[in-house]
Image: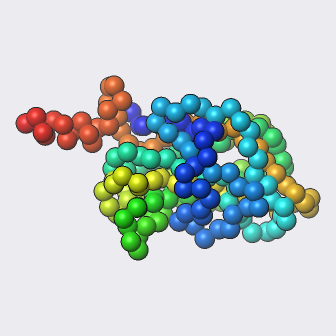
Amino acid sequence: MAKDFQQTDTVAPLGSDSGCTLFNLANTHVPRLASDGGTAGVGTPQFRFTNPQSSDEIGVMFELDPGEDMPSGDHTIRLRVTTTNTDITWTECHACYYDVNGGGLQWQNLGQNTGLGIVLDTAQVESTTIVGANAPANAYESGDRMWYVLVFNSAGAHGNNSGNFTPDQLITTPIEVVAGGIPIIMHHRRQMAVN
């Protein structure tokens, strides 16, 4: 069973960072924490593009502490759209890894989906799965983070385009867990220790 992390109302500790991407941050962008066993968010934060243009910009980011080695595999990122805007399109999603002691590899792009074309024209849950993302170059250390970067396009004719979402969805990672929520990697290590 894949391990899920709950999106919350808590501001992401890493703050506002473009992570492993080269995209600019939107005028108002929203970084939120996703945590293991966290409380689902109830707020409706807004991301805003004051000067809509043809280039894509980062509107939403989710940070989580994996707590253990992150294997390669699928990452599913969900977004509950609460205020619709036909001028805003979710175009890309990137799975970044922040390696606290990574030196030149501090930010690693594990995988991305481009060309999504998800128009925020309906108040519903949208999602994308980054299939077969790479594992980080180094083993997990305290302070390492996963960082999901959601990129939007606001090239419509109207100024001050904005969108709202509720951070109440799950982010599914490739970490595998067994009964009781114990990660398989940790389970194997415990078994080896016993033997």
Q: Say if 62 sits above or below 108 in the image.
A: above
Q: Residue at x 68, y 68 (%)?
A: 24
Q: Residue at x 58, y 39 (%)?
A: 7
Q: Residue at x 82, y 43 (%)?
A: 84
Do we see residue 106 in this rendering? yes
Q: Say if 149 sits above or below 84 in the image.
A: below
Total numbered labels: 0
Q: Quadrant of the N terminus?
A: top left
Instruction: Work out whether residue 94 or residue 24 is closer to the camera in this orientation and state it.
Output: 24
Q: Residue at x 56, y 30 (%)?
A: 39
State the image coordinates of residue 151 (x, y, percent, origin top left): 67, 58
Q: 46 left or right of 35?
A: right
Q: Quadrant of the C terminus?
A: top left
State the image coordinates of residue 91 (x, y, percent, origin top left): 68, 57
Q: 129 left or right of 57?
A: left
Q: Quadrant of residue 16?
A: bottom right
State the image coordinates of residue 113 (x, y, percent, origin top left): 57, 57
State the image coordinates of residue 160 (x, y, percent, origin top left): 87, 57
Q: 74 left or right of 117?
A: left
